[in-house]
Image (cartoon, rainbow, N blue to C red):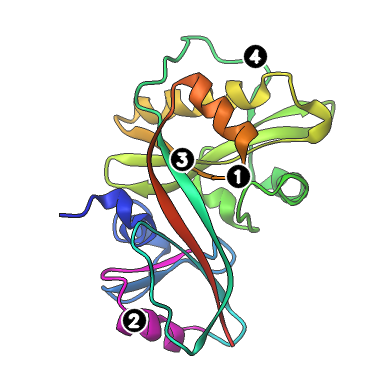
Amino acid sequence: MDHVLDNPLFNALASGNKHFANGTDDVKYFPKEVSPFAGTKDLSTTSIAALYDMLPAERAVVFITAKELEIPKQWELIHQSKVYQMMGNEVPVPTVDHEAITPLSINDVAQMLTLTKLTNPGPFEKRTIEFGNYAGIFSGDKLVAMAGHRLHIDDYIEISAVCTDPDHLGKGYARALLLYQIKKIRALGKTPFLHVRTDNTRAIEVYKNLGFTVRQQLNVRVLLKK
């Protein structure tokens, strides 16, 4: 039997993120303003074709799967890559949080969009903050680092949008924010995990040094409805 993290997007939309779900029982996708993610229960060509029929023209969607996908011909494949799925259940967490960490709100979205555009940690839209528990570090009035939650899948919560302004690297901000998020997730009785591009060696090193372990490599496919 497949693990829920092998098909994380569909299983998030069917469980902890179901309040965002558009589609049917077997084919689901997030609102564009929240996330480009989509998934299907069986990842078959039939269900991926069904998703195509649900979406408006020029809508792009992202699949993240353990299984290799056979893409129906009506879709345009515009990007493919690999990510590591890493687990943080063994990361030791201090009792005291970094003093500069500040919870983020809708008033900070403009700065969050600017920071993610600069650092490219993954998809981030105007309503991505609604996944919850975003926190950041400011230098004066400028947001220079942040992280938050994204996929909620049964007993697992994903840490996402971990990013630091290039002018503020090497200050331990990513580490502090990761530990802050892990602490919050464990307080909910859940297990933290994350996804990172396989070519993002700096981030992978940070995660491994904290105690994250690689569970598996997943396939990322970005599809466009032509």
Find residue 177 and report its horizontal and vertical position in percent: 58, 26
At label 1, the amino acid type is Asp
Which segment did they paint magenta? 37-55
Asked if the residues shown at circle 3 and circle 1 are in contact, with their CB atoms under 8 angstroms apart, the answer is no
Q: Earlier in the sequence, mark 4 or mark 1?
A: 4
Under tag 3, what secondary structure?
Answer: strand
Q: Give the residue pinned by disc 2.
A: 45
Query: Which residue reaches farthest left?
Result: 1
Front: mark 3 or 1: 1
Q: What is the secondary structure assignment of the residue under circle 4?
A: loop
- Outermost residue on the top side: it is 95
Q: Which residue is mark 4?
A: 99
Q: Residue 199, labelled with which disc?
A: 1
Task: Specify the quadrant of the image occupied by residue 205.
Answer: top right
In the image, what residue occupies the spot 46% across and 40% down? 194
According to the picture, the residue beneath numbered tag 3 turns out to be 194
The answer to whether mark 2 and mark 4 are in CB contact below 8 A is no
The answer for how far apart the CA atoms under marks 2 and 4 are is 50 Å
Can you say which quadrant of the picture contains the N terminus? bottom left
